[in-house]
Structures are given as structure tokens and as C-alpha cells.
Amino acid sequence: MAMTTEMSGSARTYDVRTYGCQMNVHDSERISGLMEDAGYVRAADADAADVVVFNTCAVRENADNRLYGNLGHLRPTKLKNPGMQIAVGGCLAQKDQGDIVKKAPWVDVVFGTHNIGSLPALLERARHNEEAQVEILESLEVFPSTLPTKRESTYSGWVSISVGCNNTCTFCIVPSLRGKEKDRRPGEILAEVEALTKEGVLEITLLGQNVNSYGVEFGDRLAFGKLLRATGDVEGLERVRFTSPHPKDFTDDVIAAMAETPNVCHSLHMPLQSGSDRVLKAMRRSYRQEKYLGIIEKVRAAMPDAAITTDIIVGFPGETEEDFEQTLEVVRRARFSSAFTFQYSKRPGTPAATMEEQVPKAVVQDRYNRLIATLEEITWAENKKLVGQKVEVLVAVGEGRKDERTGRLSGRARDGRLVHFATGDTVPRPGDIVETVVTYAAPHHLNADGNPLSHRRTRAGDAYESGRTPKLKGVSLGLPSVGVPAPLPPASEGCAL
């Protein structure tokens, strides 16, 4: 039962602050939905919110410092406003648990990745008892999709198809914080997709820690390809994406489904992490360079226009100059359209943290700089190939930091590339579709400075104009209860596996 939050005749306000991967972004939509179901309203002024919720990430080495620094900044505000509450959730909360209130005793609630649904009750309990509440479960309380969701976008939505991960990458702490993989049934996923499209959403991203291992829990190795094909039958759904797949689970039927299902975008984010077979083995990544490049070759044979992006870690323990050169070689052969790049970050609790031959910081930085230079040379060359070509752009919010100054709007092409475009005589709304021609290419974006060829108004644009975003009550799964996962040895930024 939802709890009321009204005090002195007015509803309490909340603000959710999100760090980390797409899974956390989606979890924050669940948190917002829970808060609003409990009677809270989003704060117009985030700094004056009655409740501040931090949804944390534990992947990077500086995650702890970032959280405690932000909590420290809030302490004077909390002292001036004793009725204010601070809650900490997400992966760092799952990892640090009760240590958070020891280090920051002005925190009111700590909750983990497995019991997001408890947040409103924990806030009430902390207020009633006038003491901090720490509740961390070691397995899922309910599958997150059963929780209400306050969507942030009228035109694009995340749809979780699984949670947790069965891999044991030596650099990754995420499986120990999110648990073993639990898969939703296909019918329940499609029900959520259909509910979103009925609200006007045009684009969905299927989300999982290891999205293409979907089906492992109910014994169907081809389930993910089938799911992609099924999205093609959802009326009104124009774009389907997914993130992040693992190369070891990437099968030919998925490539065929991508190529043959019209609304599945020809974009693929597939983490590489390293191009060295020796380092991949030390990372416990169960594929090698040639297998990875073989997948890319098959994807491009089926979809020559596919844009492929990746994750790369530089400076993993024991990485030699020869190993690093192998990574550069894969980058040159794969010709990625963009990449998320990270300097190896030691995380306590992972096998890699105790490995010998930790690479000196100066060496890591030098390799990182060289990687960035190589990537930018390639991404710029690949983007230049699109000058003069027509692109279909889904108009977005917040993608172009310079839009107001340049008079452009921004959005994503079907292949995921960022496009800044001139608007012409009519100004499209976020969620509308524009066709335009690329006039300039940079390493990380495209410009289209001529008049658009067409502008299609959409229901998503109507929803944006009216200030209405989708809010779903949650999709009941009818799944059996979830047991306690076996402990896993503990990913790069973004939980990309």
C-alpha cells in the first residue's frame, strides 16, 4: 500500500541523482515512479528537495569519493533543514551497506540493488523512528519491472529484459552486487513494449547486464533473436536497440534478426575490453581477438551500414606494450564509430585488484592518450563517409550542448550517431522525426546545416508538447520467487560486460 507523504497540507518533494550505467538510469525511473506513487512530487528546485536520493555506481575507483563528497556538500543543508531526508541506493550502497551511515551519519536511508521497492517505506520508518534505516537484501525482492515507473522521455524508453550476470570477469564487481542473471518472460517484455508504444514512445532499448545471454534461465539459447523479431510486430514501434551484448553469446541468429527486422536499428554496442588474447584470458573474457573480429565481419556482411561501438579498458594488470598494440590493431580493423574508453580502475573485491604487475599510472595515461588519438582518427574518417547522405533523426532533448547558441536542434540517427541539424521554417519537437542531409562530420558528431527534407510530427512529440511522459504501473511477471544467488567473483564503466 502506498504511504502518504503529506505534511502541513503539502506533498513532500524529491530529487533523484543518478550515476553510472543505463541500468542505473532505468532504476532511477523506477525510483521516481515509486516516490510519486507514495505521494511525493518532483522538486522544481533540486537543491530544495525534501528527499534527495543518490542512485550510485561502484564500477570506477573514484565512485566512493564522489558519493561521500556529494554527501558532504549536503550536510550543511541537512543541518539547516532537519526534516530533509537523504537516501543512498544502487551498487555502491549494495557494496558498502552500513558503512555509509558510519561515514555519513546524516544519511537517513540506505537500500540496495535488490530492494528498490522498499524505499518509500524506509523513508517513512526513518522519519518515524528518527534514526537511519539500512536494508540490503542479497537477492531480488521483486523483479524491477513490477514496480511503477516514471519515464524521463516521451519518445524513448528502456525495457529491462534481465537483471544480473553469470559472467566472472576479473575486473568486474557488478555481478556480486546485482546477482545472478534472472530473465523476464518474453510475453511480459512485449507487454511493456506495447504499453510504452501506446503512450507514444517510438524507440525502445532492450536492457540487460549481458543482454544476448537472455533465455539462459529458461533454457532457450535463441530467445534473444526471437525477442528481436517479435518487436517487429509491435505497432507504432519505429526503433529497437539493445545493450550490452557479450561476444561469447553472440549468435548468427541475432545478426539475422537485426538485418531482417525493419525496426531493429543497425547499431551494435559490443564491448571489446582488450585486443590482446593474453589479456582477455586474464580478464576471464571467454572470446579472443579473431572471434570478436569475426562477429563484426558477419554483422557488416549482413548490414553494411551498421555502426559498431565498444568499450575498451587500458592498463589492465600485466598489460604489456605488445598487448596494447594488439588493442590498437583491433581498433584499426574494427573501425568503430565510437568507443567508451577507460583507464583500468582497481576495485576491492575483484580478482584483478590483487593481481601482480599493476601497470604504472604514467604508462596507463600514455597508452590511453594514444588510444584516444587512434580512435578519433578512425571515427572522424568513418563519419566523413556520411557527408552528403540522408539521415533520419529522432529529435531529442539535451543532446546538443551548443544548440541554443548555434540555432540547431539535435538527435540520433537510426545508427545511433549524434546529429546536430538546422531546423528550417518549422521547429520540430523532441520526439518528432526529421530527414536531413549531412553537411559536415566531426569525430563525435555530424552536422546537417541545410533545410530538412521532411519533418514528421509524432505522438511522442505531442506528448512532449503537452508535458506528458509515460508512467507505467508495472508489469506483473508471475515468476517464481528468486533464491539467494551463489557468490560470484566480482565491469568497465557502464556495467558493459
Image: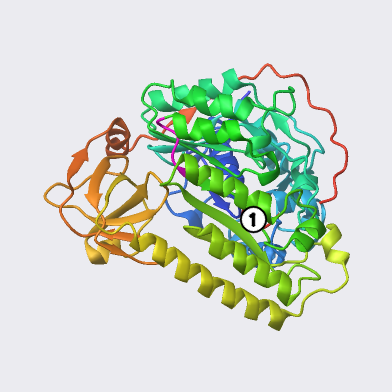
Tell me if residue 264 is in the magenta stretch: yes
Q: Is residue 426 left or right of residue 288?
A: left
Q: Main secondary structure of the magenta part?
A: loop
Task: Looking at this view, name the residue that lies furthest to the left.
Answer: 425
**Is residue 127 in sight in this rendering?**
yes
Q: Is residue 50 visible?
A: no
Residue type at mark 1: give it. Answer: Leu
Residue at 41%, 32% in the rendered image: 263
**Residue 399 is inside the magenta segment:** no
Q: In the rendered structure, which segment of residues is drawn in magenta?
A: 262-267
Q: Is residue 384 above or below residue 462?
A: below
Residue 29 percent coordinates (x, y): 54, 40
Circle 1 Cα neighbour tier, 10 Å, few/some/many (<14 / 14–19 / ≥20): many
Q: Quadrant of the N terminus?
A: top right
Identify the residue at image location x=19%, y=48%. Answer: 427
Q: Secondary structure at mark 1?
A: loop
Task: Looking at the picture, tell me which residue is in the foreground, 154 or 129.
Answer: 154
437 or 152: nearer the viewer: 437
Residue 461 falls in image quadrant: top left
Which one is nearer the viewer's eye here, 112 or 413?
Answer: 413
Q: Is residue 331 above or below residue 197?
A: below
Residue 244 percent across, percent down from the top left: 60, 45
Q: Is residue 384 above or below residue 297?
A: below
Q: Estimate the x, y position of residue 167 in percent, counting from the top left.
A: 77, 44
Q: Nearer the viewer, residue 459 or 113?
A: 459
Total marks drawn? Answer: 1
Left or right: where 156 falls relative to 316:
left
Figure coloring:
rainbow
Residue 64 position within the rendered picture, expressed as x and y whole percent measured from the top left: 72, 63
For label 1, the residue is 272
